[in-house]
Image (cartoon, rainbow, N blue to C red):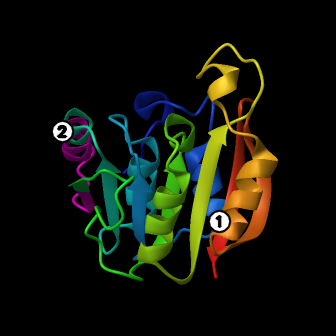
């Protein structure tokens, strides 16, 4: 099944397929997309890459977003996406078993909350040993899209914070013209 980035949106800003491929996403993996949103951009691309033997958790606090994800999964005939209603600011709310996830995706979520520690701790809890965290956030620059600059996070502060929370930085990269990306490994 081919997903057109133009259909699921976002390729103009962030190339999910390329980023996920570069970080080693493969068939049969289990992935958790924290704050998937209604367009499920990373969840859909992950579902394609992990194949029918893999599993993708699309996690969001808004039930309307989860319904939209279910509708998209049906449209693209993905039977490997499971939606989860959870408040990621509450530890354990995903109800995903400890140390079972290969990759956690947190994209454009941290700028929306002050509870970064709780969200990152939940990612750490569900990741397998040496599992990877993909973190993508808006660059702290003026841009024609996205949140106001004052809501955006400083890249260096995010790197420091993440490393203080039991992750090792594997790679830092430009995730597009307005985003930075970090690939981190669970310690």
Q: Secondary structure at mark 2?
A: helix
Q: Is residue 65 left or right of residue 4?
A: left
77 magenta-colored: yes
Q: Residue at x 29, y 72 (%)?
A: 96
Farthest residue in the bottom direction? Answer: 129
Query: Which of the two marks, 2 or 1, is nearer to us in this view?
Result: 2
Q: Residue at x 24, y 55 (%)?
A: 84
Q: Position of residue 20 (x, y in %)?
A: 58, 58
- Disc nearer the start of the sequence (2/1): 1
76 magenta-colored: yes
How many discs mark residues in the rendered view?
Answer: 2
Q: Specify the quadrant of the image occupied by residue 39.
A: top left
Which residue is tagged 1? 23
Look at the picture and state if 132 lies above or below 158: below
Q: Is residue 110 left or right of residue 160?
A: left
Q: Position of residue 17 (x, y in %)?
A: 57, 50
Q: Which residues are magenta?
A: 67-82
Q: Position of residue 144 (x, y in %)?
A: 67, 13
Which residue is tagged 2? 67
> Is residue 29 at least partly visible in the picture?
no
> Is residue 158 at least partly visible in the picture?
yes
- Residues at marks 2 and 1, CA–CA distance in whole angstroms: 28 Å
Quarter of the image for the C terminus: give it.
Answer: bottom right
């Amino acid at each position: 099944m081919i997903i057109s980035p133009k259909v699921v949106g976002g390729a103009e800003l962030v190339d999910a397929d390329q980023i996920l491929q570069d970080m080693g996403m493969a068939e049969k993996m289990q992935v958790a997309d924290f704050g998937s949103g209604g367009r499920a951009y990373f969840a859909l691309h992950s579902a394609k890459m992990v194949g029918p033997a893999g599993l993708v958790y699309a996690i969001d606090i808004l039930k309307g977003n989860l319904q939209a994800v279910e509708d998209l999964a049906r449209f693209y005939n993905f039977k490997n996406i499971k939606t989860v209603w959870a408040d990621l600011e509450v530890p354990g709310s995903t109800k995903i078993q400890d140390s079972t996830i290969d990759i956690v995706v947190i994209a454009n979520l941290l700028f929306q909350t002050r509870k970064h520690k709780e969200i990152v701790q939940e990612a750490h809890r569900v990741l397998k040993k040496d599992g990877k965290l993909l973190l993508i956030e808006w660059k702290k620059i003026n841009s024609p899209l996205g949140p106001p600059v004052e809501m955006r996070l400083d890249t260096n502060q995010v790197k420091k914070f993440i490393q203080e929370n039991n992750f090792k930085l594997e790679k830092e990269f430009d995730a597009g013209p307005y985003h930075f990306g970090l690939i981190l490994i669970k310690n």
